[in-house]
Image (spheres, rainbow, N blue to C red):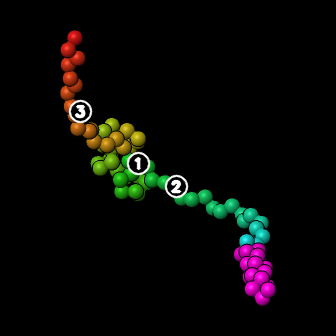
């Protein structure tokens, strides 16, 4: 009998703790300030300026996405003859 009372009290206590932890959602806050602009892929030093000497990789006089291309990959292996 006493054990059932203890269990019942523990259940009530557990429910109360659960309600306290969940709580009620508050109002939505205001929208934050926009983040800073990102860095262009060609801007290797991140200064926001086109440094032609080091960032104009394809030497066309301007810095753009064409300067962001990586190095060529290794050649693939030769195929096999089909034996027709
Ligand atoms: Ca730069
Ligand atoms: Ca370029």
Q: Nearer the viewer, residue 28 or 70?
A: 28
- Mark 2: give few (<14), some (14-19) or many (20+) Cα within 10 Å: few
First in sequence, mark 3 or 2: give its number. 2
Which residues, given as a range, are shown in magenta?
Answer: 1-21
The answer to whether residue 83 is seen in the rendering is yes
Looking at the rendered structure, the secondary structure element under dot 1 is loop
Please tell me whether residue 51 is drawn above or below residue 15 in the rendered image.
Answer: above
- Calculate the distance from the C-alpha at mark 1 to the C-alpha at mark 3: 28 Å
Quarter of the view holding residue 20: bottom right
Q: Nearer the viewer, residue 51 or 80?
A: 80
Horizontal relation, residue 23 to residue 45: left or right: right
Please tell me whether residue 14 is drawn above or below residue 45 in the rendered image.
Answer: below
Task: Kindly indicate whether the residue at mark 2 contacts the one at mark 3 (C-beta within 8 angstroms).
Answer: no
Where's residue 30, x and y in %?
72, 63
* Residue that numbered label 1 is attached to: 41
* Residue that numbered label 2 is attached to: 37
Prevailing secondary structure of the magenta residues: helix
Looking at the rendered structure, the secondary structure element under dot 2 is loop
């Amino acid at each position: 009998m006493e054990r059932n009372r203890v269990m019942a009290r523990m259940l009530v206590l557990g429910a109360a703790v659960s309600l306290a932890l969940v709580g009620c959602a508050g109002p939505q806050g205001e929208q934050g300030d926009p983040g800073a602009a990102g860095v262009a892929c060609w801007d290797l030093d991140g200064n926001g300026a086109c440094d032609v000497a080091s960032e104009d990789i394809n030497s066309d006089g301007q810095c753009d996405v064409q300067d962001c291309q990586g190095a060529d990959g290794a050649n693939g292996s030769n195929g096999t003859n089909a034996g027709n």
